[in-house]
Amino acid sequence: MKKLVLYSCLFISTAFVNSCSKKIESRTDEIAALKPAKTDIDAGTWKTILLTSATEFAVAAPAATTTPDYIAQVNEVKTWQQNISWQDKKLVKYWAAGGVLRWNEIMRELVAKHNLPPYQNADGTYPFPSANNPLAYPQFPFANPPYAARAYAYVAAAQYDALVAAHYYKKLYNRAAPYTVDATVNALIPKSDLPSYPSEDAVVIGVCTELLKLLFPGDQDFIQQKAEAHKRARLIAGANVRSDLEAGEALGKAVAQKFVTRARGDRAGAAAGNSTVWAQLETNTIARGETPWISLETPKRPPMLPAFGKVRTFLFDSLTAVSLRPAAPPSTKSDAFKKEAEEIYQITQNLTRDQIAIVHFWADGVATYTPPGHWNAIAADDFITKNFSEVRWARNMALLNMAMMDAAIVCWDTKYTYFNPRPSQVDPRIKTITGVPNFPAYISGHSTFSAAAATTLSYIVPEKAASYDAMAKEASISRMYGGIHYRADCEVGLVVGKNIGNFAVTKGQADGAGN
């Protein structure tokens, strides 16, 4: 057991685990400026996800660097640098770590803020968040794990497509950065020979402002403040002139709208279902001769997103999604089921300190950035050491998060197909130490998310494949230690997650980016 805890400490590392305290923290100020090992100048030829090609949205040719307009823009940069304050230097240092990384951190912050289940009404019913009135209680969204997985995937995939397009135009127009054009401009970040037009940072800004305002509509002022700070940092750093930023932001916004259109039609809006759907799930389960899942909250809370399994996937079509649904778990009337329930009771009666630590480390419950966010943090920590370019960061995050979104879809489809009860429902002697999730047991979401993530990350960072596999297994077994899942939930979840992760690997192998 000590070996499992050691995996948490070693492989999730000191970057955001303080002395194996099981609390995830962001490495903000200590991250060095992004200095890619290679610029990936030819990324404009990589295969996109939604864009028909890198040239789907036109970017006009920039003004020559000898024109009065460009010279005026360079002078604007010099003015910023002449009046630089310590706050400006801090801003430059923060954003120099990379736009994809920083916006991923911002997303995790927003997810954690909104990962709060609504409190019941006086009459015992539960209110539902409304995207049309996001600031009313309960605030929209309730960023539960499926919602979070979808949000991370849309933003990462759109960033990738937009950056591929940006690289196409960078190579086409080949306009150098202002610190290269004018030697009197100070380079406050590592210099790069990657063309500056359109700005890759501004492309990321354009994507994030559009998609995050859709996904977190009550936080638009916060999102816009981050965007303005990011643009200002690029000017102060001498990395971009105003027209670099404007062209990049416009391109990012155009690409984002294609993803917004997809998101509005991907069926996520109907994922909560209604009272008729909820009742039918129980009726169908009883008709099969099985014990149905019931909410263990008081008053009983409606099940979380019973129709999320119908959401449109990224990596495969709907027929493939159904084919990935595993076979049924042991019947609730079978000896095998009773044996698995008894196993969980015995485990929870004899927990060691190490096992309890593992439960809490992987819990990722209310007010956290969820299991998908946990794996984003793991990935970000490792990607920092690889010196990836922004476009490669985006590509890798897109593969990871599309895998986890599709894992959520297949997992939730499975949960509501079989509607299996939790261990503490069938055996009240079982006491959990992190609460009981308000949805059916089979299969384990943690296991499915984790195996999908570990499989994808093992392709991206192959030298850490054994570490990722160990972490996925630890995340999975943590749910048994917590009294939340049976063995079948966890073991089958790992298999399903790995199968989904393999689709992300296949996509990565065919996108032209290499490794």
Image: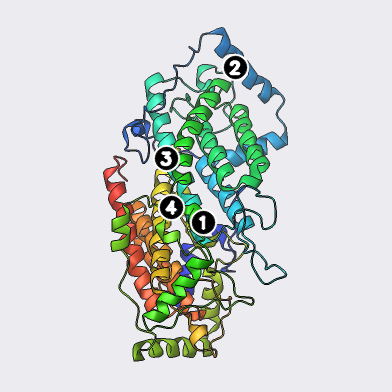
Position in image of residue 182 (x %, y %): 54, 17
Q: Nearer the viewer, mark 4 or mark 1?
A: 1
Q: Residue at x 54, y 57 (%)?
A: 15
Question: Disc 2 marks which residue?
Answer: 73
Above or below for 465 versus 66:
below
Position in image of residue 118 (x %, y %): 65, 64
Q: Is residue 209 visible?
A: yes
Position in image of residue 32 (x %, y %): 55, 44
Position in image of residue 256 (x %, y %): 48, 37
Label 4, label 3: how far apart the Cα atoms are: 12 Å
| Dots 1, 3 in contact, CB < 8 A | no
| Dots 2, 1 in contact, CB < 8 A | no
Q: Nearer the viewer, mark 2 or mark 3?
A: 3
Q: Nearer the viewer, mark 2 or mark 1?
A: 1
Q: Earlier in the sequence, mark 4 or mark 3?
A: 3
Label 2, label 1: how far apart the Cα atoms are: 42 Å
Which amino acid type is shown beneath numbered disc 4? Asn
Q: Quadrant of residue 194?
A: top left
Near-viewer residue (354 or 127): 127
Which amino acid type is shown beneath numbered disc 2? Gln
Q: Earlier in the sequence, mark 4 or mark 1?
A: 1
Question: Disc 1 marks which residue?
Answer: 147
Which quarter of the figure is the N terminus placed in?
A: bottom left
Q: Residue at x 60, y 64 (%)?
A: 18
Q: Secondary structure at mark 1?
A: helix
Near-viewer residue (206 or 39): 206
Question: Disc 3 marks which residue?
Answer: 160
Q: Earlier in the sequence, mark 2 or mark 1?
A: 2
Which amino acid type is shown beneath numbered disc 3? Tyr
Q: Residues within 10 Å of mark 3 (few under 14, many from 20)?
A: many
Above or below for 186 versus 349:
above
Question: Disc 4 marks which residue?
Answer: 401
